[in-house]
C-alpha cells in the first residue's frame, strides 16, 4: 500500500482508488480519535465521514499541505468541535461543563505533536524488534511489564549482572539508533 503522501499525490489528480485506499487506511484511527471527544459511535461515524467528504472536496489543494496526515486530523478536529458545540446548544446548563471540558481538550489538540509521538513510538518499536532475542526479552520485561532487574533475572534464570548488562547495552544502542534516525 502506498504511503499517505503518495496517495495524496494521486488523489490530487482525481484518483478515486487512491482515495478509497486512504480512507481504508486512516478510517479506524480517525474514527477512534473523534470518538474520544464526541463520546458516541454515531457522532464519531458522522464526523469521520464528513472529514473524508471534505478531504475529497478539497483534493486539488491537498498537495499544498506540508503534513497531509496532520491536515486530515485537523479537519476531523474541526468537525468534532462543531459537533460538540451544536450538542452543547441543545443541553441543559448542568451538562455544559462536561461538553466545555471536551471542547477545551480538543481545541488544544495539536495533530503534528501526536503524529510525531506516533512516529517516534514506531521507530523505537522497530529498534526493539531488531534486538537480539535475549536482550529483547530483558528489555520487554523491564520496560514494558515493569519488572525490576532482579525480578527479570529470576524470571529468565539469568544473573542480575547479566540483566544489568543487557539493559545498559539496550540504552546505549537505542541512544545511538535515535541519534542516527533524527540526524
Image (cartoon, helix red, strand yellow):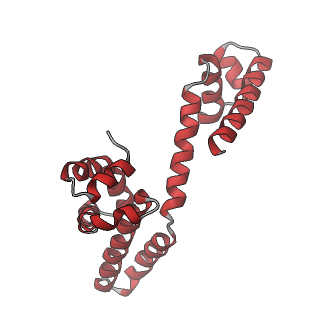
Q: Quadrant of residue 152?
A: top right
Tell me which residue sits at (51%, 65%) in the image: 110
Considering every residue shown, the one lying at the far left of the view is: 16
The spot of residue 1 in percent (x, y) is 32, 39
Tell me which residue sits at (65%, 21%) in the image: 135
The spot of residue 176 in percent (x, y) is 71, 35
The spot of residue 161 in percent (x, y) is 80, 19
Query: Image check: 183 left or right of 125?
Result: right
Tell me which residue sits at (45%, 70%) in the image: 106
Picture quarter with the C terminus: top right
Query: Image check: 134 left or right of 110?
Result: right
Q: Is residue 167 visible?
A: yes
Query: Image check: 14 left or right of 121?
Result: left
Does 7 appear above or below 145?
Answer: below
The spot of residue 34 in percent (x, y) is 36, 62
Does 56 appear above or below 138?
Answer: below
Tell me which residue sits at (31%, 75%) in the image: 83
Q: Quadrant of residue 175?
A: top right
Amino acid at each position: 500500500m502506498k504511503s499517505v503522501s503518495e496517495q495524496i499525490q494521486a488523489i490530487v489528480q482525481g484518483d478515486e482508488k487512491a482515495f478509497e485506499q486512504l480512507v481504508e487506511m486512516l478510517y479506524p484511527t480517525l474514527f477512534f480519535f473523534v470518538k474520544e471527544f464526541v463520546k458516541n459511535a454515531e457522532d464519531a461515524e458522522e464526523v469521520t465521514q464528513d472529514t473524508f467528504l471534505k478531504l475529497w472536496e478539497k483534493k486539488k489543494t491537498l498537495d499544498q499541505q506540508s503534513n497531509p496526515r496532520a491536515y486530515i486530523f485537523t479537519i476531523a478536529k474541526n468537525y468534532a468541535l462543531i459537533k460538540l458545540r451544536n450538542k452543547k446548544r441543545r443541553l441543559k446548563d448542568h451538562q455544559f461543563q462536561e461538553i466545555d471540558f471536551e471542547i477545551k481538550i480538543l481545541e488544544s489538540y495539536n495533530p503534528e505533536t501526536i503524529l510525531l509521538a506516533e512516529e517516534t513510538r514506531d521507530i523505537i518499536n522497530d529498534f526493539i524488534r531488531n534486538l537480539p532475542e535475549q536482550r529483547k526479552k530483558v528489555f520487554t520485561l523491564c520496560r514494558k511489564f515493569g519488572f525490576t532487574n532482579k525480578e527479570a533475572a529470576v524470571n529468565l534464570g539469568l544473573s542480575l549482572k547479566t540483566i544489568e548488562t543487557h539493559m545498559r547495552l539496550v540504552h546505549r544502542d537505542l541512544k545511538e539508533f535515535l541519534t542516527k534516525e533524527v540526524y
